[in-house]
Image (tube, grey):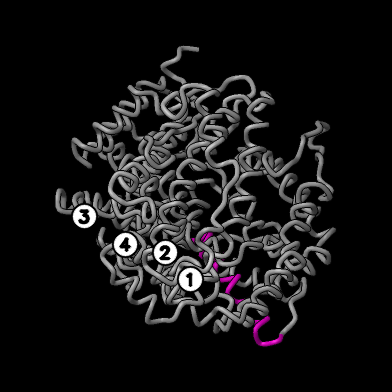
Amino acid sequence: MNDRYKWATEDLYKDLNAWEEDFRKISKPDFSEFRGKLNTAKGFLACMKKQEETDKILERLSVYAYMKHDENTKDSVYDALLNRINSVAVKYSAAAAFIGPELTALDESVLKAYINDPALKDYDYALKLVLKNKAHVLSENEERLLSLSAEATSSFKDVFTKIDNADLPITHFTYNGKRYPLSHGTYGVYLQNSDRALRKKAFKTYYKAYISLINTISATYFGSVKSDVFYAKAKKYPSALAAALNGEDVDVKVYKNLISSVNRALPTLHEYMAEKKKALNLDKMYMYDVYVPIVENADLKLEYDDAYKLVVKGLNVLGKEYTALLNKAHDERWLDVYESDGKRSGAYSISAYGAHPFVLLNYQKTTHDVFTIAHEMGHSIHSYFSNRSQPYAKADYKIFVAEVASTVNEVLLCRYLLENETDVKLKKYLLSYLMEMIRTTLFRQTQFAEFEEKVHAMTEKGEPLNKDNMSKIYLALNKKYYGKAVTGGEIKYEWARIPHFYRAFYVYKYATGIISALAIADRILTAGQPAVKDYFKFLSSGGSDSPVELLKIAGVDLTTEKPFDGAFKVFKNALEEFKTL
């Protein structure tokens, strides 16, 4: 394969010898010289500086090993590098374990003095979080007991993972005398198949497997929820929801606002489902019909270089600096483009502070893969701006905003294509692509979020969870979200197959992410340069404040109804245009 389609890992390390040289610098992490000395600004600053030096090298070593491993997962050399890095990371964590508790134990007046000290400005936000969380830190012995108990109570996700990937009785189904392999991956493919009877067989076989283990899964998930509630109460939070959102410095009212706003917009989703039912010419629409494409065989079949040029053209609205960075990434080999023997599947963006980001692709000539270029480059340029503009302590942005820049790129590209496309079939395909993106990311993830809130609230009131009441809650939500156009009973068990539920109150971030992206993209397209300027400030803000506050820089206030209403308007307009076509 031509090297220009391979990422330039030598930009991180020239060779393994250079990697080994850096590895030796951090192979024996030791911070003992700072123990008991964080109670002075000088001692705190010296400790932070040494920690940063170690973090930067460890991050660079890890990213290089990870990338080289993913180039060829069959190569044991890079497996060994990853194992060595993981080993050092464990040692590092143990060596620095005293830092958090010592800072938390400092008097409030000391922490406030640190926050206001210009010499410590790189750490002011981190210190504000330490101060904010002091009320939830227990005595040393209590914290030790909670820490010890965590290992015993954190196994529910592992149990579900074993059930879901090892014990679930699905291997295949037979249809028209032919044997079809059935797995989590193939299930999604079958649901998009134009053969309705095949979709139905795959759907029912898949859910039959979960129903056969529903008692075990119910007990496992109830255990996970009880664990969430226990730790929230132990740490003096008003709810498990508040405890989870506090970890990313997000106010509970953002979560509540998401659910109430989406509930107001459900009539538009009902209208969309009814239109999809009509477009698919169905008398009755079941849940196994929901994922079928309305428009088939309308792909953009472009060579990679042409696809990349199209992405650059589609994002031209972001200005010369942004498109210059896109071209720089293409020309200077930030991307690993094509499939190869042993290469990891999928796509991602990865970066280390002090170096440009990298992107892994497995490009195929499909519309989806064109959008994947835009998506992953959104991540990369977000990291590029943050790393360039922020000190190391503030460069890493939180997961809450991690999907915003990538989705902004997808939305802007889609809007550009819709505006310039003359082929009616392709235009209908792009509209359906946009609507499905909103349906699955905004509405579906909010449905999940509402379910999580309900079952945790029940547990906090002392009400037990079981297969019957959880399925009843989920079926009622499914009917509320999809309306009269969709029917089907087995979907009431869908809660039992969602792995994200074992990381409580995580999925709502997908919904707030796409709402923020739609609002930002719409503002850029209507307000022009002032909106672009604000967006760049957001991209450059890293993790320098609460993610909700940082989004306000780009004109998105998730504590209000405005960005939600804007997102629903995009969905409504796309639906109206689709109906017209």
Q: Nearer the viewer, mark 4 or mark 1?
A: 1
**Secondary structure under the numbered disc 2 in the rendered image:** helix
Question: Which residue is more in the foreground, 432 or 233?
Answer: 233
The answer to which image quadrant residue 185 occupies is top right
The reply, left or right, for residue 339 in relation to residue 373 is: right
In this rendered view, identify the residue nearer to me: 264 or 537. 537
Left or right of 460 on screen, residue 250:
left
Q: Quadrant of the C terminus?
A: top left
- The picture places residue 61, in percent across and down from the top left corner, at 52, 36
| Residue 218 lies in quadrant | bottom right
Q: Assign the magenta stretch its main secondary structure.
A: helix
Labels in figure, total: 4
Which residue was labeled with disc 1?
A: 103
Where 556 falls versus 58 (above or below)? below
Up-down relation of residue 429 to residue 163 (above or below): above
Query: Between marks 2 and 1, how big is the CA–CA gap?
Result: 9 Å
N-term mark: 2 or 3: 2
Q: Which residue is mark 4?
A: 550
Of labels 4 and 1, earlier in sequence is: 1
Location of residue 203 in the rendering, given as x and y in whole percent from the top left corner? 71, 49
* Three-letter code for the amino acid on which mark 3 is drawn: Asp
Look at the image and tell me whether residue 257 can be seen.
no
Q: Which mark is residue 208?
A: none
CA gap between label 3 and label 4 equals 10 Å
Query: Relative to residue 570, is residue 63 drawn left or right?
Result: right
Tell me the kind of residue under disc 1: Leu
> Can you give x and y, in whole percent of width and height, for residue 290 in the image?
57, 51
Measure how far apart labels 4 and 2 are at the Cα level: 27 Å
